[in-house]
Amino acid sequence: RPKAAKVTRASQSCKKSPNTLRVPSRPQVHCLGYGEPQLVSDGQGNKGTPQFWQLLAAAGRDVPDPWVKDSLNDVLQNGTPRLADRIATKLQVLKRLKERGVWLLDTCVVGWYIQQEAKYKRSASTGEVHRVAKQRPPKRLKRPALLLSWELYMKHVIRQVADEGALECLVPLGKEVWNAVGVDRFRAAAGAARVADPLPAPNAWLQGGYGPYFSIVSRICREVCGADADATAAPADAPLDAPEAAALVTPEKARAAGD
């Protein structure tokens, strides 16, 4: 394992000036500039998937259960409109995950998402409207890509941490991930660590929204990492330290939330 998987590691070409932080046009999900169009170097794209920032926040906080709407909106533009305040909040989220020892891991080692226009069709049998699977990359390749990535790389990362006695819980996220990898492979890699029941992907289409699952993620992390008196939303005026101070991995106590 690396000494520290820093938030800036995903965007080594970041350029900083006294007033700006510019990131590549396709930053990774844990980059502070992910989902922040104002920070993209070419001024295009970078819509992001804000649900993943809510997921990260839930993993580091005591989220209400039952779910209370807008509980994690401080990491979103509609909850914290001012960019500097929102970036400071996200940085506090990453710091909190470092303190708790929570990882967010991608099962697939290559980026699968390609931004493209959404298309819909109406079911001939039920009349319901469904979103059509995107054509790029071909959907038939997704399961093999997930499985190969797991077998050739990701399972070895998790198994090494488990063998060192540092893994306490593995939380599979996403129906496709669960179906492709399978419970037996998860358990074999996790060793004696707990493998939680799979949860939907944060960007899944769910009736009633993802809110209740944010509460479940919060509860699992609280059970594994321990309750903390300060595990609440960071104040908007929290000091914004250098991005290099934030990390997703704490080598001393590594617990994994796998995507």
Image (cartoon, grey):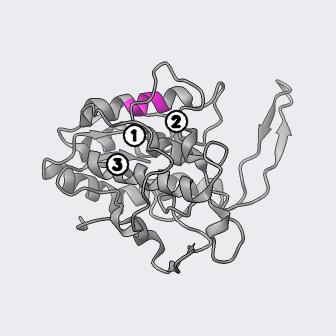
Residue 4 % position (x, y) = 27, 65
Q: Which residue is mark 2?
A: 200
* Numbered circle sitting on residue 97: 3
Say which residue appears at 52% left-offset and 51% top-offset. Answer: 143
Q: Which residue is mark 1?
A: 59
Main SS class of the magenta portion in the image: helix
Rate crowding at label 3 as few (under 14), some (14 to 19) or many (20 or more) other CA atoms within 10 Å: many
* Mark 3–mark 1 CB contact (< 8 Å): yes
Q: Report the magenta residues as a range.
A: 214-218
Residue 95 % position (x, y) = 35, 53
Going from N to C along the chain, the mark reached first, 3 or 2, is 3
Q: Is any part of residue 105 visible from this angle?
A: no
Residue 80 % position (x, y) = 61, 47
Reply above or below: 101 against 41.
above
Q: Quadrant of the N terminus?
A: bottom left
- 147 vs 14, nearest the viewer: 14
What distance separates the C-alpha of mark 3 from that of mark 2?
21 Å
The mark tally for this picture is 3
Reply above or below: 57 against 31.
above
Say which residue appears at 25% left-offset and 34% top-offset. Answer: 224
Q: Is residue 48 magenta?
A: no
Rate crowding at label 2 as few (under 14), some (14 to 19) or many (20 or more) other CA atoms within 10 Å: some
Q: Is residue 26 left or right of residue 66?
A: right
Q: What amino acid is at disc 1?
A: Ala
What distance separates the C-alpha of mark 1 from that of mark 2?
15 Å
Q: Is any part of residue 177 visible from this angle?
A: yes
Residue found farthest to the left: 164
Q: Secondary structure at mark 2?
A: loop
Say which residue appears at 44% left-offset and 29% top-offset. Answer: 63
Q: What amino acid is at disc 3?
A: Leu
